[in-house]
């Protein structure tokens, strides 16, 4: 069994919109109440670990007796918000996440999650049945996998006032086997100019949507800065800015999805670099380009698409010197300045440094695959 998410745009009517916004507010209320209680109990019992550990926190059912309006919304949404807040603290104590923050109604992005019970989340004609909301009109741009079960639904509103439902489904995965007689391999070397260079020396030619929209975005943000904060004109202009950002995001995602799908459909083994993007973003000359490219999102798209199609995605170690090694004779240079864009070797190999690196990355992917194949063969014999 496999779990996956599918996102659709929904078009609620005015009554449904009002109830959705009430649910946003109610889940935010539960989140803030539990966070406040957590902080108060900690201050009270911080010197008494046993009492702190044994304390039983208030539940949404109790809060409904104090705030009757909570009864109007989906109870599963309130429970999910309560559990999410508890998990946020658990993650904070583990050191994997930051300290939870209070939620503000001024945030332009809102969401809540409800879980399926007694088939209360299901398809109904051209819409979807959701708890408390009834049938909501939906743009069904793709079908769910056969025999899939809807486990949960997240209703959200983005900064440009568009509504979406994200379905968490569970279905039986079809197992794919790669044809071991022949492998089509490609290596991708990250490049700030063109997104990546592959083993054939070709660039992806990413259009740099964010950088090309900077002038338009700057004008819209300048107008926003001149509006009186909190006024109707301020929120109208803020919506225009949000729509520009949304268009950039949609253009970028469309490019990344199409490019990753093309690679997965045409190659069996795809090798990519593992980059420390956080460190690279500290360079003020490259930060905007790196943010625009969204390389980590591209690798994530490749990862799940390769998994679904039974293809292999190999991530080369970030300390592997792909640019310094000659792809012809395997000789490694001691130094190779970033300004030197042509790789030259004593063996006679002269080529673009990114093209050379892409070949080395593809070679590492093939070596990794063959090594694993041999190890699996030995293990099966043993």
Image (spheres, helix red, strand yellow):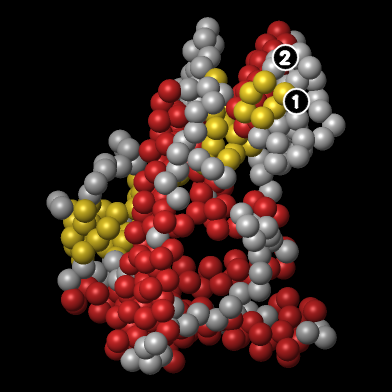
Residue 320 vs 48, above or below: the answer is above
C-alpha span from label 1 to label 2: 14 Å
Between residue 326 and residue 253, name the one nearer to us. Answer: 326
Mark 1 or 2: in front is 2
Q: Is residue 315 visible?
A: no
The 10 Å Cα crowd at callout 1, few under 14, some 14 to 19, many 20 or more, is many
Tag 2 residue: 348
Q: Are marks 1 and 2 in contact (CB under 8 Å)?
A: no
Q: Residue 362: image x %, image y %?
A: 61, 24
Which residue is rendered at x = 59% and y = 39% of the image? 190
Lower sequence index among marks 1 and 2: 1
Q: Residue 59: image x %, image y %?
A: 51, 79
Q: Is residue 164 visible?
A: yes
Q: Secondary structure at mark 1?
A: loop
Between residue 341 and residue 19, name the one nearer to us. Answer: 341
How many numbered dots are placed on residues in this image?
2
Which residue is rendered at x = 73% and y = 64% of the image? 95
Q: Residue 127: image x %, image y %?
A: 19, 56
Tag 1 residue: 325
Which residue is rendered at x = 50% and y = 40% of the image? 194
Q: Secondary structure at mark 2?
A: loop
Q: Quadrant of residue 145?
A: top left
Q: Residue furthest right?
A: 334
Q: Residue furthest left?
A: 125
215 with respect to 199 (left or right): left
């Amino acid at each position: 069994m496999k779990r996956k998410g599918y996102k659709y745009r929904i078009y609620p009517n005015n009554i449904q919109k009002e109830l959705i916004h009430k649910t946003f507010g109610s889940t935010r209320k539960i989140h803030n109440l539990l966070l406040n209680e957590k902080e108060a109990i900690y201050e009270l019992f911080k010197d008494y670990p046993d009492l702190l550990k044994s304390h039983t926190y208030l539940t949404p059912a109790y809060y409904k007796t104090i705030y009757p309006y909570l009864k109007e919304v989906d109870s599963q949404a309130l429970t999910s918000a309560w559990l999410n807040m508890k998990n946020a603290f658990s993650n904070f104590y583990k050191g994997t996440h930051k300290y939870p923050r209070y939620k503000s109604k001024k945030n332009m992005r809102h969401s809540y999650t409800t879980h399926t019970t007694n088939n209360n989340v299901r398809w109904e004609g051209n819409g979807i049945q959701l708890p408390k909301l009834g049938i909501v009109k939906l743009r069904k741009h793709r079908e769910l996998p056969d025999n899939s079960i809807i486990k949960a639904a997240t209703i959200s509103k983005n900064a440009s006032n568009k509504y979406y439902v994200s379905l968490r489904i569970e279905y039986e995965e079809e197992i794919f086997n790669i044809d071991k007689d022949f492998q089509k391999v490609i290596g991708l070397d990250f490049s700030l100019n063109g997104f990546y260079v592959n083993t054939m020396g070709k660039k992806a030619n990413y259009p740099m949507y964010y950088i090309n929209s900077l002038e338009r975005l700057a004008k819209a943000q300048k107008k926003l800065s001149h509006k009186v904060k909190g006024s109707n004109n301020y929120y109208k202009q803020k919506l225009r800015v949000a729509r520009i950002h949304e268009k950039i995001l949609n253009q970028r995602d469309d490019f990344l999805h199409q490019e990753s799908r093309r690679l997965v459909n045409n190659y069996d083994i795809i090798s990519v670099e593992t980059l420390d993007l956080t460190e690279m973003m500290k360079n003020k000359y490259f930060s905007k380009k790196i943010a625009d490219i969204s390389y980590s999102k591209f690798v994530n798209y490749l990862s799940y698409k390769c998994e679904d199609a039974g293809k292999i995605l190999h991530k080369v170690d970030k300390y592997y010197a792909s640019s310094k090694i000659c792809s012809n004779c395997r000789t490694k240079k001691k130094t190779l300045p970033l300004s030197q864009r042509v790789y030259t070797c004593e063996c006679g190999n002269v080529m673009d440094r990114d093209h050379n690196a892409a070949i080395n990355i593809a070679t590492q992917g093939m070596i990794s695959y063959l090594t694993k194949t041999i190890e699996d063969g030995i293990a099966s014999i043993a």
